[in-house]
């Protein structure tokens, strides 16, 4: 099972709508299927040149390692040489900051991941979570409390 293009586009639009209410910097969203293939990408006007690559890396990293960004961050801090090697093996498509969010259905099946970037990492994550929830799917961030 995987996210449909329609679901991916709805996640992005809902994330952008949420972000506009919060007034962060311009965001970029990448939605990937469970195999790490890009389903859709959206870059708001004024978003930086590297933002698409960063959004993909946030989502691809959680899928590639099968762990959330917070756990990636903990492991990177505990073993920086190993993390550097993993990042090199991944072609740089892995980041250790919030903003990469697993997307699951109500039964817990993995449907893909969303990467959001452009503002602070917690705000990026909040926008991704809002987009995922808006389409009735379940975000997984690794946070103790669900992001609003």
Image: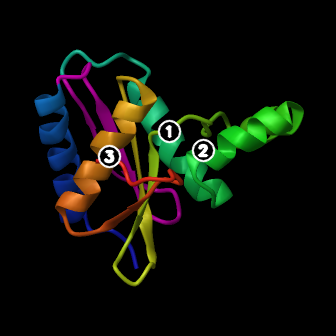
Residue 89 appears in the rendering = no
**Dot 1, how many residues are within 10 Å of its Cα: few (below 14), some (14-19), or many (20+)?**
many
Looking at the image, is 120 positioned above or below residue 61? above
Q: Quadrant of residue 119?
A: top left
Looking at the image, is 117 positioned above or below residue 109? above
Q: Residue 17: x percent and y percent?
A: 12, 40
The numbered mark, 1 or 3, whose residue comes first in the sequence reads 1
What residue is rendered at 62% in x and 39% in y?
94
Q: Are marks 3 and 2 in contact (CB under 8 Å)?
A: no
The numbered mark, 3 or 2, whose residue comes first in the sequence reads 2
- In the rendered image, which residue does mark 2 sit on? 70
What residue is rendered at 18% in x and 59% in y?
134
Magenta segment: 23-44
Q: Are marks 2 and 1 in contact (CB under 8 Å)?
A: yes
The numbered mark, 2 or 1, whose residue comes first in the sequence reads 2
Does residue 45 appear left or right of residue 76 in this picture?
A: left
What residue is rendered at 88% in x and 32% in y?
81
Q: Quadrant of residue 104?
A: bottom left
Q: CA distance from mark 3 to mark 2?
A: 15 Å
Looking at the image, is 12 positioned above or below residue 78? below
- In the rendered image, which residue does mark 1 sit on? 98
Callout 3: SS: helix
**Dot 2, how many residues are within 10 Å of its Cα: few (below 14), some (14-19), or many (20+)?**
some
- In the rendered image, which residue does mark 3 sit on? 128
Quadrant showing the N terminus: bottom left
Q: Nearer the viewer, residue 49 or 128?
A: 128
In the rendered image, residue 43 lying in the magenta stretch gets the answer yes
Looking at the image, is 125 positioned above or below residue 46? below
Q: Nearer the viewer, residue 124 or 11?
A: 124
């Amino acid at each position: 099972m995987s996210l449909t293009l329609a679901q991916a586009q709805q996640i992005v639009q809902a994330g952008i709508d949420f972000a506009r209410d919060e007034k962060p910097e311009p965001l970029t969203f990448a939605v990937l299927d469970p195999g790490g293939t890009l389903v859709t990408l959206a870059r708001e006007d004024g978003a930086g040149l590297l933002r698409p690559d960063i959004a993909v890396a946030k989502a691809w990293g959680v899928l590639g390692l099968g762990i959330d960004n917070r756990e990636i961050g903990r492991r990177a801090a505990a073993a920086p040489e190993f993390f550097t090697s993993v990042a090199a093996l991944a072609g740089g498509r892995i980041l250790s900051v919030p903003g990469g969010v697993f997307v699951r259905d109500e039964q817990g099946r993995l449907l893909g991941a969303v990467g959001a970037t452009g503002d602070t990492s917690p705000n990026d994550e909040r926008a991704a979570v809002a987009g995922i929830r808006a389409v009735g799917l379940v975000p997984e961030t690794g946070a103790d409390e669900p992001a609003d």
